[in-house]
Image: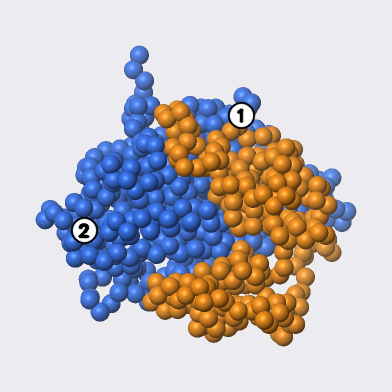
Amino acid sequence: MGDFIKHPFVDAPDRNPAPLIPGDQLVFTSEEKKQIQTWISRYPTADGAIMRALWLAQEKFSFLPPEVIKLVAEEVGIPYANAYGVATFYTQYFKEKKGKHVLDVCTCFSCQLCGGYDMLHYIEEKLGVHKGETTKDGLFTVQEAECLGACGTAPMLQITNGTFVHNLNKDKVDALLDALREGKMPAFTSVTLPQDEDEMGGNRRTDVNSVESYIVPPVSETVS
Amino acid sequence: MEEKKTKAGDWRSYQRVLLPPVKDLHKLDVYEKHEGYKALREVLTTDKWDPTSVTNEVKKSGLKGRGGAGFPTGLKWSFMPPVDPNIPRFLCCNGDESEPGTFKDRQLMEYNPHLVFEGMLIASYAMSIKTGYLYIRGEFADWITLMEEELEKAYAKGYVGKNIMGSGFSCEIVIHKGAGAYICGEESSLMSSLEGQRAYPRVKPPFPAQKGVWGYPTTINNVETLTCVPLIINKGGEWFSKIGASSHPGPVLYGISGHVNRPGVFEYPTGMLISDLIDEVAGGMRGGKKLKALIPGGSSTPILRADQIVGVTMDADSLRDAGSMMGTSGMLIMDEDVDIVSWLRRITQFYHHESCGQCTPCREGTGWLENIVTRLDEGNGQLRDLDILLDLCTQMEGRTVCALADAAAWPIRYTIDRFRSEFEAKCRPENVPSGGVLETA
C-alpha cells in the first residue's frame, strides 16, 4: 500500500532560471506587435488579448519559457505574474521544449473504448519513447490528451495543437510518421456527416482536399 | 399497420434545418441564397420586431439551452438588466465543447458558420448588446481559422460591424481562442478566461446577467442554442415549439460515438427514442453485439443500463424519469464487452486532470476518486472501497464553486449504483491483501 499515494511533493520552480532563448532573438517584429495591438483593441482591457499573444509567442518560439512570457506580458502591458498564471493554467501552452511535432493522442473514454490506447502504445513503441517524452532526434513528442472533441472518429490524434488526424489505425500512423519525417504536414480533413452522405452523396464542402467519413470504430485491444 | 407515434413524430422524413442539405453552405454567397441573414434583416429593418418581441418569440418557441443544463433561452435573455447607455453589455457564445463525448458544435462551425454569427447578432439585438465574444476551444485551431475567414467576409459585406444594414444597430463579433481547459466550458470560468485570467469559476450569485465579463451584464449561450435563433425568427416560435418533444422542442444534433456501425453527428428532433437512435440512425451495434450501457449526453450525465432505456426518449423529462440527463446529447454507446470499471477509471482520470484546483473538495477529491477506482480496476480493491467512494462523492457534491465536482461525482455514484456487481467482482475476497479486513457492504 506504500505506493498508493501517487502525488509526490513538488519542488518550487526555479525563480531565476537561465534563459533558454538568446536575448537577441527575444523580440517581436513590428507586424507581430501590430497584430497584438489589434487583439488588444477588441477587448475592454488589455488582459483579454493575453491568450492570443501567448499563442503567437508559442508559434514563434515553439514553447513558453519564463523570458518569453515576460516579453509577452510587457508587449500586452499586463503584470508578468498574470501572464505567467495564464500560461501555466492551460495545457496547450508548452512550458518546456517539446519535439518538432507534438502528437496528442486522445485516450479519453470514447477513444479508450475504440482503441485509443492501442494507438498510443503503438506510437510509443514505434518511436521508442513513453508518453510525455521526446524522441532523441527531437522530432516527436508523444502525449496522452484528454477529449479533443472528435469522439465519432475515434481513435484520433492532434498534431502540435493543429490538425486532427481521424480514424487512426496502424497503417495510418505509419504513413503519418513518415510524412512528418519528410516535413509534410497533413491537410485539414473534413469529416462527412452520415446524413450528408445519404442526401448529397458526399461531403458538403467542395473547397477541402482531404475528406473522410465516420466509420465503424475498431475493436479495442487494450483498455488502459 | 400504424407505427406507434413517438415524440419525435415522423422523424424518418425529417428535413434538416440547422445543417440543411446544401453544398458549400459555409460560403457567404451560398448562405445568402438560402435565406442567409434574412432573419437578421427582418429583425433589424422591419417594424414588426423590437428587442422585446424577439425575446418573446424565443420564449414562445420553448428553446432550451443545448450546452448541458437545458435552461430556457428566452428566460435567460430576459434576466439582463434594463439598458443603460453608460454600461456595456456582452454576449458570449460558448464554443468550448470540451465535455467528453460531445462533438456537435464543431460541425456547425465547419458547415454553417454564418448561422452561428447570425444567431449571435440577433441575440445581441434582443439584449441591446454591442459586442459578442465567440469562445472556441484552442484544440479547434483549424476551425477557428475557418470561422475567422468567414467572419471577415461577413464584416466586409456589412453583416457585422457598425450600422448593420443601415439600421443604426452596431455589433462586433470577436473570436476568442482558448488553450485547452475543460473548465472553460463552465460559464463563469469562460468569463475569467475571456478576461485573460486563469480560468477559475466564480461564485454565483452575482449571476452573469448582473455581473459578467469585466463586471458588466453578460449572457452566455451555447453555439447550438444560438443557431436555433434565426430559424425561430424566420419560421416563428410556434413552428419551433412543435418540433419534437413539446417540453423540450427543437432540432438537436445528436453526436453518437462508441460501438455502433455508423457513428457521427445526426440532426433530428428532440424526443427520439434511444433505441431508434442506436438501431436505425446509428446503424445498430458493432458486430451485432448487445448493448450494455450508454451515457446520453456527455461524461457527466448518469450512465444508463440497457434495460433502463426501454421507451426512453431523448428529451429532458423522459431522461430525468429514466434517471439521467439530456446534457449535450453527445451519446456514448457501449457494448457488452466493455469493462465498466476501466471505463470509470478513465473518467476519473479525466476529472482529476481537468479540476482547476480552486476548491479543495474537488482538487483533492478527484485525485482520491482516481486513486481508489484505479485500485479497484487493478484488482487490489476491497468492498469497503465502494463505500469510501460514495462517501467521497457526498463530500464533493455541492461543496464547490462550480459544478465540476458534481460532474465528477455523478459518474461514480451512478455507475456504482447501476453496475455494483462488476465492482464487486473486481474485489473478490482472495484479492484482499493479507491482513486486510473484508467488510460486507
Q: Amino acid at mark 2?
A: Met
Please state the total of marks drawn on the protein image. Answer: 2
Residue at coordinates 41% horizontally, 61% vertically from top-left? Answer: B134
User: Nearest the camera: B421 or B120?
Assistant: B120
The subunit carrying tag 2 is: B
Q: Is residue B124 visible?
A: yes
Q: Residues within 10 Å of mark 2 (few under 14, many from 20)?
A: some
Residue at x-position 60% and y-position 79%? A27
From what the image shows, is residue B267 above or below residue B407?
above
The foreground one among A14 and B369 is: A14
Q: Colour of chain B?
A: blue
**Residue drawn 16% across the image and 59% down it:** B50
- Residue placed under numbered mark 2 in the picture: B165
Label 1 with label 2: CB-CB less than 8 Å: no
How many C-alpha atoms fall within 10 Å of the one at disc 1: few (<14), some, or many (≥20)?
A: many
Q: Most extreme residue toward the right, as rendered?
A: B434
Coordinates of residue B410 in the picture (x, y in percent): 55, 53
Quarter assignment of residue A119: top right
Visual hue assigned to chain A: orange
Q: Residue at x 33, y 39 (%)?
A: B17
Judging depth in this view, the residue of B320 and A206 nearest the camera is A206
Asked if marks 1 and 2 fall on the same chain, the answer is yes
Q: Mark 1 highlights which residue? A: B286
Residue B313 x %, y %:
42, 36
First in residue order: circle 1 vs circle 2: 2
- SS under mark 1: helix
